[in-house]
Image (spheres, grey):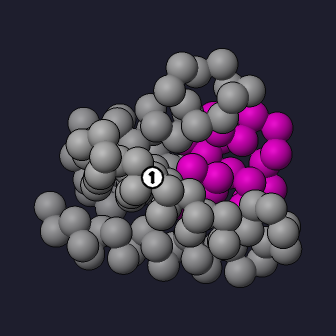
Amino acid sequence: MNFNGIEKEVYSYVEKLYRKVKSPSHGFDHVLRVYRLCLEIGMREKADLNVLKIASLLHDIGRALGYEKNHAAKSAEIAEKYLSSLGLPPEFIERVIEAIKAHSFSSGEIP
């Protein structure tokens, strides 16, 4: 898996979707802040940075598409379909989906 190519593809996809989002708190700048924080924490914790990169880019994709209620679950659903379309390994996709589902306090998932 050429991860750099995958990351660039996902980044481009997310950036295009967020061009229409006018939220000061959950726009593309928010996604980039989460991305940077995930990398910072992930390096300290020796986490799988590839999973964190993709999960952080896609974590609020449901919001970008207009789903506010249960956005974490909707984001995970959208991300799973999108990542599957890229031909990524199911095990990798599952780890990304777990992270997306767990990012919202209101989801009830334990991070």
61 relative to 29, above or below: above
Q: Secondary structure at mark 1?
A: helix
Residue under label 1, please give it.
38
59 relative to 11, above or below: above
Q: Position of residue 103 (x, y in %)?
A: 58, 37
Q: Which residue is located at x 66 percent, y 71 percent?
A: 28
Return the residue found at the far front. 44
Q: Position of residue 64 (x, y in %)?
A: 72, 61
Q: Which residue is located at x 36 percent, y 76 percent?
A: 8
Q: Which residue is located at x 75 percent, y 34 percent?
A: 70
Q: Position of residue 74 (x, y in %)?
A: 65, 41
Q: Which residues are magenta?
A: 57-76
Horizontal side of 59 relative to 2 (left or right) equals: right
Is residue 90 in sight in this rendering? no
Q: Which residue is located at x 71 percent, y 80 percent?
A: 19
Q: Quadrant of the N terminus?
A: bottom left
Secondary structure mostly seen in magenta is helix
Is residue 59 in sight in this rendering? yes
Which image quadrant for residue 10? bottom left
> What amino acid is labelled 1 in the image?
Cys
Q: Is residue 105 magenta?
A: no
